[in-house]
Image: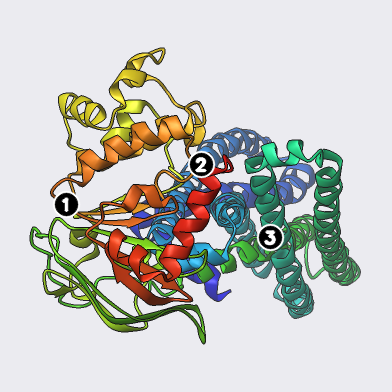
Amino acid sequence: MKNYLRLLRYIKPYTHKMIEAIICIIVAAGANLYLPWIIKDMIDKVLADKDMQMLNLIAVGIIVTFIIRGIFYYGQSYLVSYVGQRVIIDVRDALFSKFQHLPLEYFDKHQTGEVMSYISNDVSALQSALVDRLIELFTELSIFFGSLVMMVMLDWKLSILTLITVPLVGQAMKIFGRKLKQSGTVVQERKSDITAFMQEIISAVRVVKSFGREEYEIDRFHDQNELNFKAEMKNVQQMSLLTPTVEFLAAVAVTVIVWFGGYEVVNGHITAGALVAFLTYAVNLANPVKRISRVYGNIQKAMAGADRVFSVLDLPETITDKEGAETLPPTEGHVTFDDVSFEYKKDIPALQHVSLSARPGEMIAFVGPSGAGKSTIANLIPRFYDVKSGSIKIDGHDVRDVTLESLRGQIGIVPQETMLFSASVRENIRYGRLDATDEEIVEAAKAANAHDFIMQLPNGYDTKIGERGLNLSGGQRQRMAIARAILKDPQILILDEATSALDTESEKIVQAALDRLMVGRTSFVIAHRLSTIFGADHIYVLDHGQIVEHGTHEELLARGGLYSNLYNIQFSKRNNGEF
């Protein structure tokens, strides 16, 4: 229960509400506990002694008891739900915040659907454990201990006989609880698999339909569903075994009480009313034990979700501000790589001993075959990953010695695959600088050659563009990304194959916007189409993570190396109408 106790620590900010809830639970449980005592007085005083005054008191007592019970039952339900929901919100916030601070390396290894499953499925499991189950647990524990006190007051010998079965029940709950937690973990993993599968297939629905693989994916989803079904049934099987086991032990206890209690009444040691009241409390004792066992099982199942949540919250944040990190001052844009090496997987180098320098305002281009390390260089400048060895400096400041906020705040990125949000055009462009005015947004759009097409949209800048901007063409999305970068006004710019996925007409429009964006900025351009980098100040040719050539376009062509070979292949295709 270590993680459950850790989860309960999230209740600390709401301690006063929780105390009020516990008081309500105790009073509501106390009202329930008063009813068997009424039965005792009814038998021993009203029926035996014909006491009408006692009968009147009992009648009033029943009404008052149920009024009190109703009021405090409402209080317990509302207050526990309030605390539980607040804790769930705090856990969900903490989890989302953690995902925001985890390095890209984590997302390279985990599917989007799996990440979503933590926040949806696993947090939902915690909600069950904290809200519904917590009310049950406190209520049943209050009834259990209250009944026990009442039983001792009525007859201590019968109480000792009753308590003999409690350790047996506890041991049964411990054994089954361990198994339920294990099966609950499998259930949560299967739910995560289903969420990840659905996210992947729905995102790739065009591919599925283009290959006519609908039935194939239906079969795959059915297989995932079957695995989830088997995991759920394993958990149900264990839950179903726990309850009758506890009920049997409780039945043994009641049998012993009935026999010995009858013996005590026959011998005049207790009254018949006291025995009936004792039996009622014993049932009150047995029912909470049974329900507590079920609650315990459900909590164990839910704690599988807690284990998964805390496993994420405990992950190290490897890309963080070092202690004493300074704010990067407004940069001129002088970037140097000094003997930089990097690897995504151990002992598989992605970059090897890369050294280069970019002076303020220069355009630096990277070309080479797929997997040569071009995008890796782009990922290292804003510290999406940290170098294995060597250093990257901006105006003499090692990027690891400055705060991430100040570093990334001065770098603009226009990727090949533009990611837009399902918000308005205005909100997507404003993402570059949240305090930008509407006039500044329009100016940025004009500079990105985006204003004209935006004004043709149904609601202009207030048009909702749909998930990932799929209501726009590729060129339109790219121009919005450029407008976003222009609004940010960074001194260092990274263009990661920003026009490679566009048709010729769109490329010309976008390239014109990019040329305007790069003026006065240090620009790093990862190029697929060499025509976009003829004017670069320096071109670095990479192969297998190493710089094999560098120079201007004319110098590299004259050298007749890898760049010249890439140029000849690309432009021979273009001349033949293949490119």
Up the image or down, 360 lies above or below 398; here it is above
Report the Cα–Cα distance between label 3 and label 1. 49 Å
The type of residue carrying mark 2 is: Phe
Q: Position of residue 100 (x, y in %)?
A: 39, 57
Image disc number at residue 188: 3
Q: Earlier in the sequence, mark 3 or mark 1?
A: 3
The residue to which callout 2 is attached is 72
Q: Earlier in the sequence, mark 2 or mark 3?
A: 2
Image disc number at residue 521: 1
- Per the image, label 2 sits on a secondary structure element best described as helix
Q: Taking the image as drawn, is residue 383 in sight?
A: no
- Per the image, label 3 sits on a secondary structure element best described as helix
Q: Callout 2 environment at 10 Å: few (<14), some (14 to 19), or many (20+)?
A: many
The type of residue carrying mark 3 is: Gln
Q: Judge left or right: residue 238 versus residue 516.
A: right
- Per the image, label 1 sits on a secondary structure element best described as loop
Q: Position of residue 397 (x, y in %)?
A: 14, 73
The residue lying toward the viewer, choosing from 197 and 311, is 197
Tell me the quarter of the picture where residue 463 sits: top left
Tell me the quarter of the picture where residue 226 sits: bottom right
Q: Residue at x 35, y 71 (%)?
A: 559
Tell me the quarter of the picture where residue 233 sits: bottom right
Q: Callout 1 environment at 10 Å: few (<14), some (14 to 19), or many (20+)?
A: some
The residue lying toward the viewer, choosing from 7 and 19, is 7
The quarter of the picture where the C terminus appears is top right
Report the Cα–Cα distance between label 2 and label 1. 67 Å
